[in-house]
Amino acid sequence: MTWPTRAARPVLGVALLAAVLLTGSGCSSGADERRGPEWKKGAGAPETAAYMKVEVPEGATEVKGAVKLVPQDAVQLLTFVTTPERAEDLGQQFVGQGPLIVRPAQSGQSAGDPSFAHLGTPEPETLPGLRWAGVCPPCLKDQRRKHMQWIEIYLQKLDADRTRVYLRAW
């Protein structure tokens, strides 16, 4: 093995140091990315309902909520099962400039971020026949929800007496 000339040694040292620093200076490692999302400890349905300014109907079942921590924000999730009438009443708060619309189901791979799976429910975007509405509360001058950038609701008819409500806000 031949050693570099005395003049080349500092250049090689700087290059080696730069390579080491660049390799270790990323914001996250592959292990961080594989770790998955972080969830706010202790945050459940009462906290998310309060943030969304939503009253969970009396007698609702399967009430679940969580707060997903994402860079520079937090995504609030709330789901429950109630009567179709109560679900419709709640849905009317979020129609914005039009009625709730039926959105086509997406495949599991294209449905985006699996947030509701954390609550033990399917992702609403993957289910056929759901009705949806989404609004920007500040854009509509909704003073109760002016602290949110966006809130959306999905209504899933389970049977004649039960509708699952999905709410997502940030």
Image (tube, grey):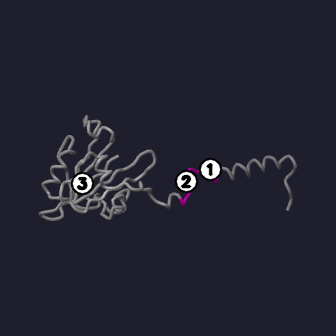
> Cβ–Cβ below 8 Å for labels 1 and 3?
no
Identify residue type, mark 2: Ser
Residue at mark 1 to residue at mark 3: CA–CA distance: 41 Å
Residue at mark 2 to residue at mark 3: CA–CA distance: 34 Å
The span picked out in magenta is: 22-31
Identify residue type, mark 3: Tyr
* Residue 155: percent from left, percent from top: 21, 56
Q: Quadrant of the N terminus?
A: bottom right
Element assignment for label 1: loop
* Residue 109: percent from left, percent from top: 37, 62
Find disc 1 in the rendering and name its residue.
25
Residue at mark 2 to residue at mark 1: CA–CA distance: 8 Å
* Residue 112: percent from left, percent from top: 37, 56
Find disc 2 in the rendering and name its residue.
28
Element assignment for label 2: loop
Q: Residue at x 35, y 59 (%)?
A: 110
Mark sitting on residue 107: none
Find disc 3 in the rendering and name its residue.
154
